[in-house]
């Protein structure tokens, strides 16, 4: 996890098993969610499994993964397995099993693993499709510091985060639920036990402590990427023919959005009627405040899919339909 200095000594981690979605006891949370998350143990070149020469065994680069689809498919963070020569996963009962790397998408920091279908790793039952609200309760489940699975809880601090600098394509849920190294690829779940996101990144303080500014890839982007990785081994992305930039300070005084800087001739953007200088303010119902927001909103759609773009041209507000090539 970028920006975090690791320290092993005097680690105290509370294991919070809280009732979720009205189950009424911790065992329901454990059986329905904890069993869908596994620990990931990559073998990095020149390093022993489960640690590095600088860090004791049990510390990073261990990670986590979530059962995202039937037949043994697990989603994890790409950065956790990027340089792995081989990958094992540790099941809830402690058994180790090899995992196959099906495909990766470095732009969104998502990788897809596959294990034997006869292993008891149930798919997380429900994936959250709608947007959450600020302040909604969430819990993060992952292999913190390689100690095994644990749960921390907090709230949704922000939605649709982009421009954090972690990934080329970002659609983050920000949370104050404590997230530490080893939880990369873990699950962020809502109060009904639905998968809200995949733990991806954190901001950390200089004191090596969790700063409460943590990020999970949204379930929407996770599903978009993982489905392509499962079906094609790579992510299929369409061409819009649209280039945008952040507005200047003077432009932002008038309105927030992303300014069209170029439209390729005969492209989907040109056929939709967009022009250089248009200010994009909304895509498929998502508010747009920066060029990064446009990048994310477009990449949430597959080739041949259509979506609405709302923009301002001078004082006129218009909405057009764009179909990706």
Image (cartoon, rainbow, N blue to C red):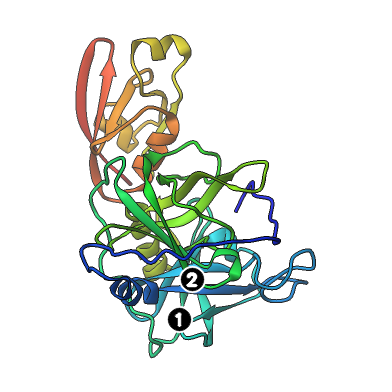
Q: Position of residue 278 (x, y in %)?
A: 33, 20
Please name the residue that numbered disc 2 is placed on. Answer: 149
Q: Position of residue 125 (x, y in %)?
A: 26, 70
Closest to the observer: 250 or 161? 161
Q: Quadrant of the N terminus?
A: bottom right
Closest to the observer: 35 or 80? 35
Q: Residue at x 31, y 37 (%)?
A: 268
Relative to 279, 63 lies left or right: right
Neighbor class of circle 1 (other Cα within 10 Å; few <14, some 14-19, many 20+) is some
Q: Position of residue 246 (x, y in %)?
A: 46, 24
Quarter-of-image position of residue 317: top left
Q: Residue at x 69, y 61 (%)?
A: 8
Q: Does 217 sit above or below residue 11? A: above
Number of marks in picture: 2
Of labels 1 and 2, earlier in sequence is: 1
Q: Residue at x 66, y 74 (%)?
A: 50
Q: Residue at x 31, y 50 (%)?
A: 137
Q: Which mark is drawn over residue 92?
A: 1
Task: Confirm or deny contact between disc 1 and disc 2 (CB under 8 A).
Answer: yes
Q: Secondary structure at mark 1?
A: loop
Neighbor class of circle 2 (other Cα within 10 Å; few <14, some 14-19, many 20+) is many
Q: What is the spatial separation of the Cα atoms under label 1 and label 2, in whole angstroms?
A: 8 Å
């Amino acid at each position: 996890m970028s920006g975090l200095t690791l320290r092993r000594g005097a680690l105290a981690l509370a294991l919070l098993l809280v009732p979720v979605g009205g189950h009424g006891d911790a065992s329901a949370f454990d059986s329905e969610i904890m069993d869908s998350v596994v620990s990931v143990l990559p073998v990095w070149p020149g390093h022993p499994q489960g640690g590095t020469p600088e860090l004791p065994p049990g510390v990073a680069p261990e990670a986590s993964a979530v059962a995202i689809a039937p037949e043994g498919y697990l989603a994890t963070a790409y950065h956790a397995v990027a340089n792995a020569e081989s990958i094992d996963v540790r099941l809830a009962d402690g058994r180790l099993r090899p995992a196959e790397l099906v495909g990766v998408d470095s732009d969104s920091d998502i990788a897809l693993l596959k294990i034997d279908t006869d292993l008891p790793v149930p798919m997380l039952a429900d994936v959250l499709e709608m947007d959450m609200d600020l302040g909604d309760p969430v819990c993060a489940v992952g292999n913190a510091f390689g100690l095994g699975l644990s749960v921390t809880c907090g709230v949704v601090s922000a939605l649709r985060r982009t421009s954090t600098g972690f990934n080329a394509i970002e659609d983050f849920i920000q949370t104050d639920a404590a997230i530490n190294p080893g939880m990369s690829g873990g699950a962020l779940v809502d109060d009904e036990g639905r998968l809200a996101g995949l733990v991806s990144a954190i901001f950390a303080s200089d004191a090596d402590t969790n700063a409460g500014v943590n990020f999970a890839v949204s379930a929407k982007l996770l599903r978009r990427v993982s489905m392509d990785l499962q079906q094609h081994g790579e992510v299929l992305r369409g061409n819009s023919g649209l280039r945008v930039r952040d507005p200047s300070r003077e432009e932002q005084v008038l309105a927030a959005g992303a300014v069209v800087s170029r439209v390729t001739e005969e492209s989907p953007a040109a056929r939709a009627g967009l022009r250089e200088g248009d200010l994009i303010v909304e895509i498929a119902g998502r508010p747009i405040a920066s060029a990064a927001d446009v990048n994310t909103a477009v990449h949430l759609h597959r080739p041949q899919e259509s979506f609405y773009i709302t923009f301002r041209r001078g004082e006129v507000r218009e909405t057009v339909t764009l179909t990706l090539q």
